Amino acid sequence: MTLVLILGFLLLQFLLLLLSPPHAADSLPPASPIRCDENAGCVVSNAYGAWNDRRTECRAGSAVYPTTEAELLSAVAASRDSKAKVATAFSHTIPKLACPQPGGNSSNGSTTSSVLISTAQYRQALEFGPADRTVTATSGWGLREVIDAAEERGMSLAAAPYWEGVSVGGMVATGAHGSSWWGRGGAVHDAVDAVSVVVPAGCREGFAKVVRLRRGDPGFGAAVVSLGLLGVVSQVTFSLEPRFKRSITYRFQDNSSFEDEFTDLARSHEFADITWYPSQHTAVYRLDDRVPINTSGNGVNDFIGFQSNPILVSTAVRATEKALEKSKNIKGKCTVAKTEIAYKKLVGNGLKNEGIIFTGYPVVGYQGKMQTSGSCLHSSKADPLSMCAWDPRIKGLFFYETTAIFAASKFKDFILDVKKLRNLNPDNFCGVDIYNGFLIRFIKSSEAYLGQNEDSVVVDFNYYRADDPLTPRLNQDVWEEVEQMAFFKHGARPHWAKNRKVAFLGVQNKYPKMDKFITEKKRFDPTGIFDSVLSDEILFGKESEKYDGCALDGQCICSEDTHCSPSQGYLCKPGLVYQEAMVCRYTDSTVQ
């Protein structure tokens, strides 16, 4: 009966997606991440409705919404005796970077006196430089708006993350990126020519000031990828290029040797990436290059995962996965994964020739339509029956995203280790293939102190997250072992805006310029107004205490069984391939 239900949900999902009009993009816009009550203060969340730490919600005494730089100065100045954090309109960060909890190094900043400084309404007019070679945007502008404005003037922003639901200030501060080892590379902060930050100051300067920095200035390397720890990003100047077109083809092939081919792929194709589906032994190469501006084609990259979905589909998919988890039905997950991958192949993963439907490769279109996507964000009719699949207002998708950034020289060994673990039972990897498998991208070395100090390979993978943080997942041990393999055996660095808490353990030792960043942070914010518990953990390696069940949601690495869930049969055990890993593994005989 369970399998019949699962297949019914799967068929419903497939048919609804197949029959949805290809041009439909109307959806209910995301809710504001900040909710305030005049008596109880404010609560800030993220777009998923849950931070990586779900034990307590993030509260603040108040929230302000500056619309000008003068108002931004006033907001920072007014925070001098409290704690402050920057929040954005989109809030797609998984760690609590926007939470103004007092840090361990600070004596001030109770929850009641803390303030959220939102950039949602800080959108002064865009300013284009000489010959339109640059564009300056205040931090509240959305990425899509900046791209469209540049394209209208015959210019393109070369680097952008794949998800367009980010603000200018947020994407620069957290190291958002696309994929490229060419030119300045795929990281957005490496396309920044200048940045202005409003920081705390002394009495003579009115308790706040604007620091304006250009590339090459002392402090510039700290001001980009600042994690919101220096102050509030006021405006950013991006370098632009003459408008160009891209041609994209997805090539499906066996995964037997992609760990030996990724370097050649990245050097041969400017915007290349690889999607690896380990349970299906399949690697999908994205062959993505500039083409002459007169090349025929007006294509659009409308990535299938970022399209607006009927609520019925999203809730059905979630219900299906919960049923599979509860019944520990690995084969059922593999059925779903095979169907998902086949559908993505059928529709070109959301690529649309002439912006309508996918009719075949290559798909050629202007940079502004091919580099990033997020059609579920946009609404013309505010259709309440359709929205982003992970919107917390519905019982839709709920997942974690682990993102590990490897030195290019270490990436092959990581993949070989994952293959060893996969080969023990390929079905154990079907859960990640339901989402996007392993998405592999490329970013260049950077001047940013918290950017990458060498050419690197970025690996993203999404997986099921339980509604209750104390509920174990199917194949819990597998994903914990992959995670620990990445960050501890192979020394990967975490993406600042993603990951479970364990990914940040020891991170301060992985960035050669971390000391420089801390020095600049103390110079910009000497009293620690923008510090928090999380920033103390990241910058100074402070670890919170372990508690019963802390490993289940990635808040710790288990060292005893109680950190897992013995009552549900999950005990703390060594890894199967990386035996130094300690993971929560299901053992049927222990269930009481």
Image (tube, rainbow, N blue to C red):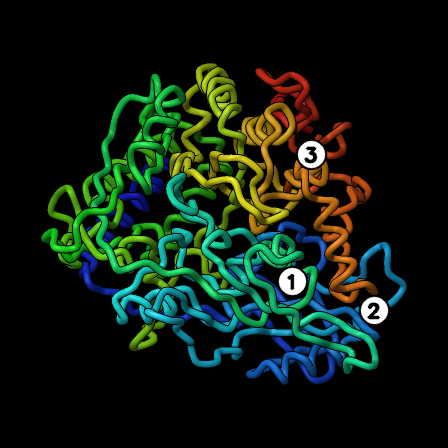
Q: Nearer the viewer, residue 36 or 204?
A: 204
Q: Secondary structure at mark 1?
A: loop
Residue 110 is labelled as 2
* CA distance separating discs 1 and 2: 15 Å
Disc 3 residue type?
Ser
Task: List x then y, in percent, for residue 239.
Answer: 41, 60
For the question of whether residue 165 can be seen, the reply is: yes
Disc 1 residue type?
Ala
Above-or-below relation of 173 to 37: above
Q: Secondary structure at mark 3?
A: loop
Quadrant containing the C terminus in the rendered view = top right
Q: Which residue is mark 1?
A: 98
- Sort mark 3 into few (<14), some (14-19) or many (20+) by Cα contacts within 10 Å: many
Residue 565 is labelled as 3
Q: Nearer the viewer, residue 320 or 517?
A: 517
Q: How many marks?
A: 3
For the question of whether residue 312 can be seen, the reply is: no
In the shown orientation, is residue 19 left or right of residue 259? left
In the shown orientation, is residue 527 left or right of residue 51? right
Residue 581: image quadrant is top right
Q: Residue at x 84, y 75 (%)?
A: 81
Task: List x then y, in percent, for residue 333.
Answer: 39, 33
* CA distance separating discs 2 and 3: 34 Å
Disc 2 residue type?
Ser
Q: Residue at x 70, y 76 (%)?
A: 209
Which circle's residue, 1 or 2, is located before the other in the chain?
A: 1
Which circle's residue, 2 or 3, is located before the other in the chain?
A: 2
